[in-house]
Amino acid sequence: MKGPSPHVRLDANHNRKIVAVMANKAVVGEKVGMTQVWDDANRVVPVTVLHVAPMRVVQIKTVERDGYNALQVTFGEKDARKLNSPDRGHFEKAGVAAGKRVLELRLDNVDDFEVGQEIKVDTLAAGEFVDVTAVSKGKGFAGTMKRHNFKGQRASHGAHRVHRAPGSIGACATPGRVFKGTRMAGRMGAEKVTTLNLRVVSADPEKNLLLVRGAVPGPKGGIVVIRDAVKIHTKGDA
């Protein structure tokens, strides 16, 4: 498998190099939870445990035929008799055992993959940086103080039962309307979130477990997509 191709530019504001790499590796996992491990310097490192079951390539999409490069993969097992005819035919055409879910992984280069190939957690190695995408936890209906970090109104001195209210959302005559995008109360969470530049602590192919440093979006049992980090920050000379 080809390694990532780096493109470096200097961020003068933070005195760091931003290394943009091409995403050539990606896996799908399930969030197990968080724990902590100790590094070589005996420091506690918070990690998120991800279960990455072996994936099977069902279809390969290319720029020439589909307009973009991607892998269509499946994982787990599912009784083919419980699939509808189009899905069952799709798996049979690829010669791949039916899985419980089908996902698409966008990559910059798919030349090294073939239909039926198995992708495991050892695709990633300790020390690499990854971007993790998942659907965040749903919080339900939330006010502006929780949803948008509003300050709120006065605690006293004339404030009457409006302590957590958002305040004015627009004038009466001019403009005479509420602007689109005004931050207000509403449903919070359950959105697609990507956390950048998480370091891989370890990858265990025997137990199909991946440990990444830091927190990962979503609840326990949620599906996450792990791929090569596309923006790696390193220290550089200004």
Image (tube, rainbow, N blue to C red):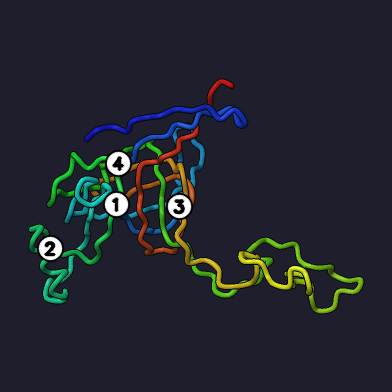
Specify whether residue 99 is in view.
yes
Are there few (<14), some (14-19), or many (20+) residues within 10 Å of tag 4? some
Kind of residue at badge 3? Thr
Do the residues under discs 4 and 2 have CB atoms within 8 angstroms? no
Q: Is residue 119 above or below residue 155?
A: above
Locate the C terminus and report the quarter of the image it occupies: top right
At label 4, the amino acid type is: Asp
- Can you name the residue that lies furthest to the right here? 157
> In screen coordinates, is 99 left or right of 135?
left
- Write down the residue under mark 4: 108
Which of the marked residues, 3 or 4, is nearer the chain's N terminus? 4
Q: Tag 2's secondary structure?
A: helix
- The tag on residue 105 is 1
Q: Residue at x 86, y 74 (%)?
A: 159
The residue beneath circle 2 is 91
Give amino acid for label 2: Phe
In terms of secondary structure, where does tag 4 sit? loop
Label 3 belongs to which residue?
Answer: 194
Per the model, the C-alpha gap separating discs 3 and 4 is: 18 Å
Identify residue type, mark 1. Leu
Q: CA distance from mark 4 to mark 1?
A: 10 Å
